[in-house]
Image (spheres, rainbow, N blue to C red):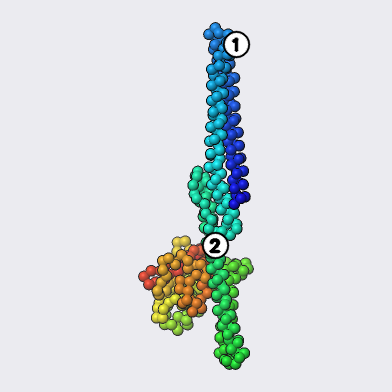
Amino acid sequence: MTDARRMGGRLSTRLLAATLLVVGIALAIVAIGVLRVGGEAFEALMMAAGDSADHARDMFDASVTVVFVVALLVAAAVAVVVAMVLARRLARPIERVAAAASRIAEGDLDARVPEDGPAELRSLAAAYNMMAARLAEQESIRREFIVNASHELRTPLTNLQGYLEAMRDGVIPADAATFDSLREEVDRLTRLAASLDVLAGAEGRPGIPRDVDVSLLVRGAVDLVAPAFSRRSIEVAMDVAPSLEARVRPDELTQVLANLLQNAVRYTPDGGRVEVAASRAADGLDIRVANTGPGIPPEDLPRVWERFYRVEKSRDRERGGAGIGLAIVKQLVEGAGGRVAVTSEGGWTTFRLTLPA
């Protein structure tokens, strides 16, 4: 705060000095014009009327010069006062922004400044407040990410620890079923690590796009999850155009489709319905995955693409979701130049991808 005030004081001094310099130059020009040029003109006119040069000069000094000097002194005093007020008015908002920025640097992300003063300073304050709000939002997301990541790691690790201690104490036998359970928890950790790698961009350079038939990728992705749909009596309807040639990264698109379909498996009720469609649109390829179910509340729709965000946290954890599948979908699709969207109404939740053709 002290540094900000010191900076504001220096700024006020510089503004005041600059203003006084401009005023001084203006007054000097006026003084030269009035006292010299005006005096010479007055003297010439008086001499033309028959008066002497000395008398004309005395008359000019006694009338115009005295009045002008008094007016000059008054103008200078007023200019100093006005310059000080204006300099302080301009410096104060900047001082507040500097002080708030220092508070943010010290960790106070709630520091805000009033948006007042001239238009340019209001714009500066608004930009600062927006920046501070974004920083606070990112800090909140970071903390939530750490908490959720810790939970997702802790759950399988706790299960593994419990199984191993029970096997060591002879509580449960070290048979094939137990090892299968251990393997499931290890696989869960492996999937989570792989997903975090994708989100962090740690997968190395992305694959090279190539011409593929997207309709085959869509049908293949549905076939892979068909047993999961069948076990829960979920009806699957496909409306996929027979040939959708496009230049894409097939591995990434396959992962995107798998994540969307696994999401449908997780949230479609038993006996529900899932519809998968793919067609050519005016701006590329349109892929839609829709499922019946309770839907997503309107206030949650913008956040479903966030990492670890859950509409119903307890239910999602019971079913094994890490809450990052849709975040990966968004990252991969937008990284390929596409768009993602989601709607939820009338008992249907629809995820839509638009890929450049």
Whether 138 is drawn above or below 129: the answer is below
In three-dimensional space, the C-alpha distance between marks 2 and 1, rounded to whole angstroms, equals 81 Å
Task: Look at the image and tell me whether residue 5 can be seen.
Answer: yes
Whether 116 is drawn above or below 341: the answer is above
Which residue lies at the image location 50% right of the left edge and 50% below the top edge?
114
Label 2 Cα neighbours within 10 Å, binned few <14 / some 14-19 / many ≥20: few
Secondary structure category for the residue under label 1: helix
- Residue 342 at what x, y percent from top left? 44, 67
* Residue under numbered circle 1: 54
For the residue marked with disc 2, what is the amino acid? Gln
- When asked about the image quadrant of residue 169, the answer is bottom right
Looking at the image, residue 311 sits to the left or right of residue 157; the answer is left
- Residue 134 at what x, y percent from top left? 53, 58
Secondary structure category for the residue under label 2: helix
Q: Nearer the viewer, residue 200 or 340?
A: 200
Labelled disc at residue 138 = 2
| Mark 2 or mark 1, earlier in chain | 1
